[in-house]
Amino acid sequence: MKTNHHTHTSRCKHATGDVDDYCRAARRAGLTVLGFSDHAALPDNRWLSVRMEYGERNAYCAALEEARENFPDLTILKGMECEYAPAYRAYFEDELLGRLELDYLVGAAHFIAHDGAWLGVYRGITDAAALRSYAAAYVALIEWGLFAFVAHPDLFANSYLAWDQHAEACSREILRAAEAQGVPLEINGYGFRKPWVETPEGRRPMYPWARFWELAAEYDIEVVLNSDAHRPEDVAANLDDAAAIAARCGLRVADLSCLEPERQGR
Protein backbone atom coordinates (compact mmCIF):
# COMPACT_ATOMS: atom_id res chain seq x y z
CA MET A 1 0.00 0.00 0.00
CA LYS A 2 1.44 3.35 -1.08
CA THR A 3 0.73 6.27 1.24
CA ASN A 4 1.82 9.86 1.86
CA HIS A 5 0.84 11.74 5.01
CA HIS A 6 2.72 14.98 4.31
CA THR A 7 1.18 17.16 1.60
CA HIS A 8 0.93 20.94 1.22
CA THR A 9 -1.22 23.22 -0.91
CA SER A 10 -0.90 26.75 -2.24
CA ARG A 11 -2.43 28.03 0.99
CA CYS A 12 0.98 27.77 2.64
CA LYS A 13 2.36 30.26 0.08
CA HIS A 14 5.43 28.22 -0.87
CA ALA A 15 3.62 25.37 -2.59
CA THR A 16 1.52 25.15 -5.74
CA GLY A 17 -1.81 23.49 -6.48
CA ASP A 18 -4.99 22.96 -4.50
CA VAL A 19 -6.50 19.90 -2.89
CA ASP A 20 -8.06 18.42 -6.04
CA ASP A 21 -4.79 18.79 -7.98
CA TYR A 22 -2.99 16.66 -5.41
CA CYS A 23 -5.79 14.12 -5.30
CA ARG A 24 -5.70 13.64 -9.07
CA ALA A 25 -1.92 13.27 -8.96
CA ALA A 26 -2.19 10.80 -6.06
CA ARG A 27 -4.64 8.69 -8.04
CA ARG A 28 -2.28 8.62 -11.02
CA ALA A 29 0.63 7.66 -8.76
CA GLY A 30 -1.30 4.77 -7.25
CA LEU A 31 -1.52 6.17 -3.72
CA THR A 32 -4.22 4.74 -1.48
CA VAL A 33 -3.89 7.24 1.40
CA LEU A 34 -3.25 10.96 1.02
CA GLY A 35 -2.81 13.06 4.13
CA PHE A 36 -2.86 16.85 3.85
CA SER A 37 -0.72 18.77 6.33
CA ASP A 38 -0.54 22.41 5.36
CA HIS A 39 1.42 24.58 7.78
CA ALA A 40 -0.99 25.35 10.59
CA ALA A 41 -2.71 28.71 10.71
CA LEU A 42 -1.83 30.52 13.94
CA PRO A 43 -4.14 32.78 15.97
CA ASP A 44 -1.80 35.78 15.66
CA ASN A 45 -0.86 35.03 12.03
CA ARG A 46 2.80 34.66 13.01
CA TRP A 47 5.17 33.52 10.24
CA LEU A 48 2.41 34.26 7.77
CA SER A 49 4.69 34.16 4.72
CA VAL A 50 4.93 30.36 5.01
CA ARG A 51 1.48 29.28 6.20
CA MET A 52 -2.23 29.74 5.68
CA GLU A 53 -3.99 32.69 7.27
CA TYR A 54 -5.99 32.16 10.44
CA GLY A 55 -9.21 32.88 8.57
CA GLU A 56 -8.57 30.11 6.02
CA ARG A 57 -8.91 27.19 8.43
CA ASN A 58 -12.56 26.43 7.75
CA ALA A 59 -12.16 26.70 3.97
CA TYR A 60 -9.19 24.32 4.11
CA CYS A 61 -11.21 21.73 6.01
CA ALA A 62 -14.20 22.19 3.70
CA ALA A 63 -12.00 21.59 0.64
CA LEU A 64 -10.77 18.33 2.16
CA GLU A 65 -14.29 17.19 2.99
CA GLU A 66 -15.38 17.95 -0.57
CA ALA A 67 -12.41 15.99 -1.92
CA ARG A 68 -13.52 12.97 0.07
CA GLU A 69 -16.77 13.07 -1.89
CA ASN A 70 -15.05 13.64 -5.23
CA PHE A 71 -12.34 11.00 -4.80
CA PRO A 72 -13.98 8.07 -2.99
CA ASP A 73 -11.19 5.73 -4.10
CA LEU A 74 -8.69 7.71 -2.00
CA THR A 75 -8.48 7.82 1.78
CA ILE A 76 -8.02 11.55 2.36
CA LEU A 77 -6.89 12.72 5.79
CA LYS A 78 -7.15 16.20 7.30
CA GLY A 79 -4.06 17.41 9.11
CA MET A 80 -1.80 20.38 9.75
CA GLU A 81 1.92 20.77 10.40
CA CYS A 82 2.56 22.60 13.67
CA GLU A 83 5.55 24.54 14.98
CA TYR A 84 7.08 24.17 18.42
CA ALA A 85 5.88 27.28 20.26
CA PRO A 86 4.48 26.62 23.76
CA ALA A 87 1.99 29.50 23.51
CA TYR A 88 0.06 27.56 20.84
CA ARG A 89 -0.16 24.18 22.49
CA ALA A 90 -3.73 24.60 23.79
CA TYR A 91 -4.79 25.98 20.40
CA PHE A 92 -3.38 22.95 18.59
CA GLU A 93 -5.19 20.59 20.93
CA ASP A 94 -8.49 22.40 21.52
CA GLU A 95 -9.04 24.11 18.16
CA LEU A 96 -7.27 21.97 15.56
CA LEU A 97 -7.80 18.51 17.00
CA GLY A 98 -10.92 19.59 18.90
CA ARG A 99 -13.31 21.96 17.12
CA LEU A 100 -11.94 21.38 13.60
CA GLU A 101 -11.66 17.61 14.19
CA LEU A 102 -8.49 17.19 12.20
CA ASP A 103 -7.45 13.57 11.84
CA TYR A 104 -3.88 14.24 12.91
CA LEU A 105 -1.21 16.83 13.52
CA VAL A 106 2.43 16.77 12.44
CA GLY A 107 5.08 18.27 14.70
CA ALA A 108 7.99 20.19 13.18
CA ALA A 109 10.41 22.96 14.04
CA HIS A 110 11.18 25.36 11.22
CA PHE A 111 11.77 28.15 13.77
CA ILE A 112 13.32 27.63 17.18
CA ALA A 113 13.74 29.79 20.25
CA HIS A 114 17.44 30.54 20.53
CA ASP A 115 19.40 33.21 22.34
CA GLY A 116 16.31 35.31 23.02
CA ALA A 117 14.97 35.31 19.47
CA TRP A 118 13.40 33.05 16.84
CA LEU A 119 15.97 31.36 14.64
CA GLY A 120 15.15 29.95 11.21
CA VAL A 121 16.26 26.34 11.00
CA TYR A 122 16.97 26.11 7.28
CA ARG A 123 20.13 28.22 7.36
CA GLY A 124 20.57 29.05 11.02
CA ILE A 125 21.90 25.88 12.67
CA THR A 126 25.64 26.48 12.37
CA ASP A 127 27.10 25.93 15.85
CA ALA A 128 26.77 23.70 18.89
CA ALA A 129 24.61 26.17 20.82
CA ALA A 130 22.04 26.33 18.02
CA LEU A 131 22.06 22.54 17.80
CA ARG A 132 21.23 22.32 21.51
CA SER A 133 18.27 24.66 21.02
CA TYR A 134 17.14 22.63 18.02
CA ALA A 135 17.31 19.37 19.95
CA ALA A 136 15.39 20.91 22.85
CA ALA A 137 12.61 22.03 20.50
CA TYR A 138 12.26 18.59 18.91
CA VAL A 139 12.34 16.80 22.26
CA ALA A 140 9.59 19.08 23.54
CA LEU A 141 7.50 18.46 20.41
CA ILE A 142 7.81 14.73 20.94
CA GLU A 143 6.95 14.98 24.62
CA TRP A 144 3.80 17.03 23.97
CA GLY A 145 2.08 13.87 22.76
CA LEU A 146 -0.10 15.73 20.22
CA PHE A 147 1.51 14.56 17.01
CA ALA A 148 1.05 11.46 14.90
CA PHE A 149 4.69 11.81 13.90
CA VAL A 150 7.48 14.36 13.95
CA ALA A 151 8.60 15.65 10.56
CA HIS A 152 12.19 15.78 9.27
CA PRO A 153 13.99 15.53 12.64
CA ASP A 154 17.28 15.80 10.73
CA LEU A 155 16.40 19.17 9.18
CA PHE A 156 19.39 20.72 10.97
CA ALA A 157 21.52 19.00 8.29
CA ASN A 158 20.60 21.86 5.92
CA SER A 159 23.14 24.14 7.55
CA TYR A 160 25.12 22.02 10.02
CA LEU A 161 27.30 20.19 7.54
CA ALA A 162 29.77 18.18 9.60
CA TRP A 163 28.88 14.98 11.43
CA ASP A 164 30.72 15.62 14.70
CA GLN A 165 30.18 15.11 18.42
CA HIS A 166 27.63 17.94 18.52
CA ALA A 167 25.56 16.59 15.62
CA GLU A 168 25.61 13.15 17.20
CA ALA A 169 24.59 14.50 20.62
CA CYS A 170 21.69 16.44 19.09
CA SER A 171 20.55 13.37 17.16
CA ARG A 172 20.74 11.10 20.20
CA GLU A 173 18.60 13.47 22.25
CA ILE A 174 15.87 13.37 19.62
CA LEU A 175 16.12 9.62 19.15
CA ARG A 176 16.00 8.92 22.88
CA ALA A 177 12.86 11.03 23.22
CA ALA A 178 11.20 9.30 20.26
CA GLU A 179 11.98 5.91 21.77
CA ALA A 180 10.74 6.90 25.23
CA GLN A 181 7.49 8.43 23.97
CA GLY A 182 6.78 6.02 21.11
CA VAL A 183 6.46 8.84 18.57
CA PRO A 184 7.46 7.95 14.98
CA LEU A 185 10.05 10.03 13.15
CA GLU A 186 9.71 10.95 9.50
CA ILE A 187 12.16 10.12 6.74
CA ASN A 188 11.32 13.06 4.52
CA GLY A 189 11.74 12.77 0.76
CA TYR A 190 11.65 16.51 0.04
CA GLY A 191 15.35 16.90 0.84
CA PHE A 192 16.26 14.72 -2.13
CA ARG A 193 14.58 17.28 -4.42
CA LYS A 194 16.46 20.26 -3.00
CA PRO A 195 19.98 21.33 -4.00
CA TRP A 196 22.53 18.97 -2.50
CA VAL A 197 25.21 20.33 -0.16
CA GLU A 198 28.99 19.97 -0.14
CA THR A 199 30.26 18.72 3.22
CA PRO A 200 33.55 17.54 4.71
CA GLU A 201 32.37 13.98 3.96
CA GLY A 202 31.34 14.75 0.39
CA ARG A 203 28.21 15.78 -1.43
CA ARG A 204 24.87 14.73 0.10
CA PRO A 205 21.18 15.69 0.16
CA MET A 206 20.26 18.45 2.57
CA TYR A 207 18.24 15.73 4.27
CA PRO A 208 17.54 12.92 4.95
CA TRP A 209 21.00 12.69 6.51
CA ALA A 210 22.19 9.09 6.30
CA ARG A 211 24.25 9.53 9.46
CA PHE A 212 21.16 10.37 11.50
CA TRP A 213 19.25 7.32 10.31
CA GLU A 214 22.20 4.99 10.76
CA LEU A 215 22.31 6.17 14.37
CA ALA A 216 18.55 5.66 14.64
CA ALA A 217 19.13 1.94 14.12
CA GLU A 218 20.47 1.84 17.69
CA TYR A 219 17.06 2.87 19.08
CA ASP A 220 13.69 1.15 19.32
CA ILE A 221 11.77 3.60 17.15
CA GLU A 222 9.40 3.60 14.18
CA VAL A 223 9.58 5.75 11.09
CA VAL A 224 7.13 7.13 8.55
CA LEU A 225 7.94 7.65 4.87
CA ASN A 226 6.64 10.80 3.22
CA SER A 227 7.24 12.88 0.12
CA ASP A 228 6.45 16.27 1.76
CA ALA A 229 4.87 17.31 -1.54
CA HIS A 230 4.80 21.00 -2.41
CA ARG A 231 3.73 20.37 -6.03
CA PRO A 232 1.07 17.92 -7.23
CA GLU A 233 3.61 16.07 -9.39
CA ASP A 234 5.68 15.36 -6.26
CA VAL A 235 2.89 13.74 -4.29
CA ALA A 236 4.62 10.35 -4.34
CA ALA A 237 8.15 11.56 -5.07
CA ASN A 238 11.12 9.93 -3.33
CA LEU A 239 9.02 7.55 -1.29
CA ASP A 240 11.19 4.73 -2.63
CA ASP A 241 14.33 6.59 -1.56
CA ALA A 242 12.95 7.02 1.95
CA ALA A 243 11.97 3.35 2.04
CA ALA A 244 15.49 2.38 0.97
CA ILE A 245 16.97 4.26 3.93
CA ALA A 246 14.57 2.51 6.31
CA ALA A 247 15.40 -0.88 4.84
CA ARG A 248 19.16 -0.32 4.86
CA CYS A 249 19.10 0.81 8.50
CA GLY A 250 16.63 -1.86 9.63
CA LEU A 251 14.03 0.66 10.78
CA ARG A 252 10.39 -0.35 11.32
CA VAL A 253 7.78 1.58 9.34
CA ALA A 254 4.87 2.73 11.49
CA ASP A 255 1.28 1.75 10.69
CA LEU A 256 -0.68 5.01 10.50
CA SER A 257 -4.02 3.42 9.60
CA CYS A 258 -5.23 4.43 13.06
CA LEU A 259 -5.51 8.01 11.75
CA GLU A 260 -8.29 7.13 9.34
CA PRO A 261 -11.65 8.54 10.47
CA GLU A 262 -13.49 5.22 10.49
CA ARG A 263 -10.86 3.79 12.80
CA GLN A 264 -11.30 6.77 15.10
CA GLY A 265 -15.03 6.15 15.31
CA ARG A 266 -15.96 9.24 13.31
Image (cartoon, rainbow, N blue to C red):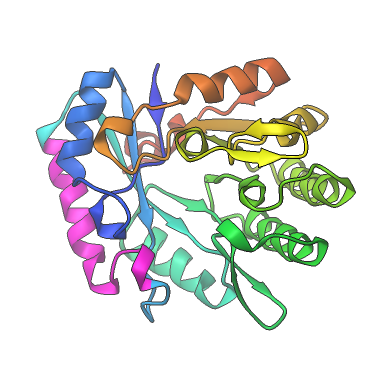
Residue 145 drawn in magenta: no
Q: Which quarter of the image is occupied by the N terminus?
A: top left
Q: Which residue sits at x=70%, y=61%?
A: 134
Q: Which residue sits at x=63%, y=63%?
A: 124
Which of the 4 image quarters holds residue 266?
A: top left
Q: Which residue sits at x=68%, y=16%?
A: 248
Marker count (numbered):
0
What is the span of residues highlighted in magenta in the rendered image? Answer: 48-69
* Residue 117 spot, x, y in % from top left: 63, 81
Residue nearest the observer in this picture, 187 or 99 = 187
Q: Is residue 132 left or right of residue 153?
A: right
* Residue 263 spot, x, y in % from top left: 39, 34
* Residue 109 spot, x, y in % from top left: 57, 59
Residue nearest the observer in this picture, 172 or 260 = 172
Residue nearest the observer in this picture, 212 or 182 = 212
Q: Which residue sits at x=24%, y=53%?
A: 10
Residue 66 drawn in magenta: yes
Q: In this view, does 231 lie to the left or right of 93?
A: left
Work out whether residue 27 can be spotted.
yes
Q: In this view, does 167 lie to the left or right of 182?
A: right
